[in-house]
Amino acid sequence: MKFFFILRQTFNNLWRERTPVVATVLTICIALTILIALFEVSWTLYSQLSDLKSNLVIEVYLDPALSEKQAGTIQKQLEQYNTIERIRFISKETAADIFREEFGENITDILDENPLPISFEIRLLPEYNHPGYMSLFKKQVESISGVDEVHYRHAVIEKLEQLTEAIMVSGIFVLIILVFAMNLLIRNTIKLSVYAKRRQIEIMKILGAGNMLIRMPFILEGAFEGLIGGILSATGLIVMHKFIASSFSLVTFSLHTYKLIWVYTLSLGILIGLLTSAGSVGKFVNKIFSKK
Amino acid sequence: MIQFSQVTVNYGYVPGALKDINLQLRDGDFTLLIGPTGSGKSTLLRLIYMDILPSSGTVTVDKWSSYRISPRQINVLRRNIGVVFQDFKLIENMSVFDNVALPLVIEGYRRKYIIRLVRLLLDEVNMLQSERQQASTLSLGEKQRVAIARAMAKNPFVIIADEPTGNLDREASRNVLSLLERIHQNGTSVIMATHDYELIKDTPYRRIYMENGQILPPDRTFSPLNQRINLLADPQ
């Protein structure tokens, strides 16, 4: 009977304060959608970045005049770096084979000679696969006598890293504002409900109702707002997922099943609603009755 | 038993809402608290259900003492006391049934028991036919009868009635008084505050006269301002 009483009071509160409840639910929905979308975008960018980094090679081109024996000496110098995972030696002939594979033509047929230099493909250890070390490594290797040029696709990595960082920073900024707004709105709805029910609370206190029975309907009200916000957010995210997956087939999602989206959004929504309302209802009840 | 020992109540910076009250109310008595508005009757009653605690002195209600009582114990005490107010304190948007059921819901009784008991109580105050009606649609007399049914729901050892007839016409007032008398006849103590001297002038119950936050000694009458009223109230 107590349980049904609490439940009835909860829905009563929600119906009585329906306009602020709608505003709160929408804010929770937007905040959760942004939170999960931000997590998804960051995760996607991060995994793309990791893929790119793990496949990244540094190409070291030697002076075309160098013989294979001289190239061997340079290889020995490079092998002294303990930041290198492996070095692949590419002779002039191998370079010509690669050219033929990539362009379908024999370079010696076009130029009568093979101008391609001896080179090395260097893969760094994963912990050194970041632009900071790579540019230092590039400078050091370029200073070795006989090395003509050092190449790696740093621009792409740097751009991707900057993009990830920018999304994270702006996302966190927006999120802080939204969490603040969400908190404010939930607290405001609870405050309105408590104020509207002040007489009922007073009567219940006189009849000997404990704090839990008085506060529980308001706490559940917050949780319910979180639940509805979570349902709306999950629906929106699933629609977005479907659209992105059909438009960009290469994009992978961290929350790869709809079940996961439901679990994350609903549990986050309920938790936020529950904690905010539980944290504020006692304060509002005490405030109203201390004025008497 | 309810006992007041050297009880003083000050509201904030306003001293002397009650001044040095010593009083004993025995179990099973019907006690009338008589005095003009502002004499301290309501303050004295609020001390019994510990809506306020004394600034000094001690109030003892059954096994509970204001000297050492926790908020949780106050809730338990209130569940053993029935309170009736001048403004009824019903939840207006709830049905008559739900209002009477509220103390039983708070206590956590089972649904079947609550339905049976509430109907019995409503029948007792002649309100069973209105059980589904919203409290806001009742007449003032009906509201007070519902409030009395609610106060009886927990079979309290005492019913405190703070000006229960204050808002009622003569006939409704008599009905409320006779209801309280019936409750008293069943063994429950009743403490009723009133300034409706006409209503109680022929009743045989113990009277306590209050003025300016003090209980007047038996050999003293009200101040000249209240003299006429005192004479009206006392049947002797």
Image (cartoon, grey):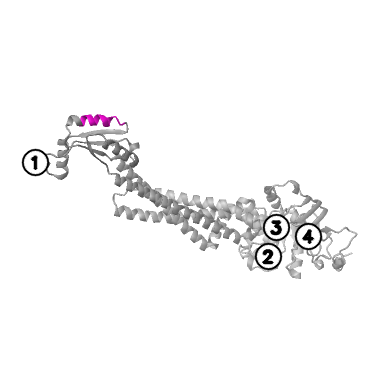
Within 10 Å of disc 3 (Cα), the crowding (few <14, some 14-19, many 20+) is: many
In front of the other: B39 or A30 = A30
Alpha carbon distance from label 4 to label 3: 19 Å
Identify which amino acid the numbered label 4 is placed on: Lys
Q: Nearer the viewer, mark 1 or mark 3?
A: 1
- SS for callout 1: loop
Residue A257 seen in this snapshot: no
Dot 2 or dot 4, earlier in sequence:
4
Residue A15 seen in this snapshot: yes
Q: Residue furthest right?
A: B219
Residue A254 on image: x %, y %: 37, 46
In front of the other: B74 or B37 = B37
Quadrant position of residue B209: bottom right
Alpha carbon distance from label 3 to label 2: 12 Å
The quarter of the image holding the C terminus of chain B is bottom right
Circles 3 and 2 on the same chain: yes
Identify which amino acid the numbered label 3 is placed on: Ala
Q: Nearer the viewer, mark 4 or mark 1?
A: 1
Q: Please tell me the numbered disc located at residue B143.
A: 2
In front of the other: A67 or B26 = A67
- Give the magenta range: A71-81
- SS for callout 3: helix
Marks 4/3 in contact by CB < 8 Å: the verdict is no
Marks 2/4 in contact by CB < 8 Å: the verdict is no
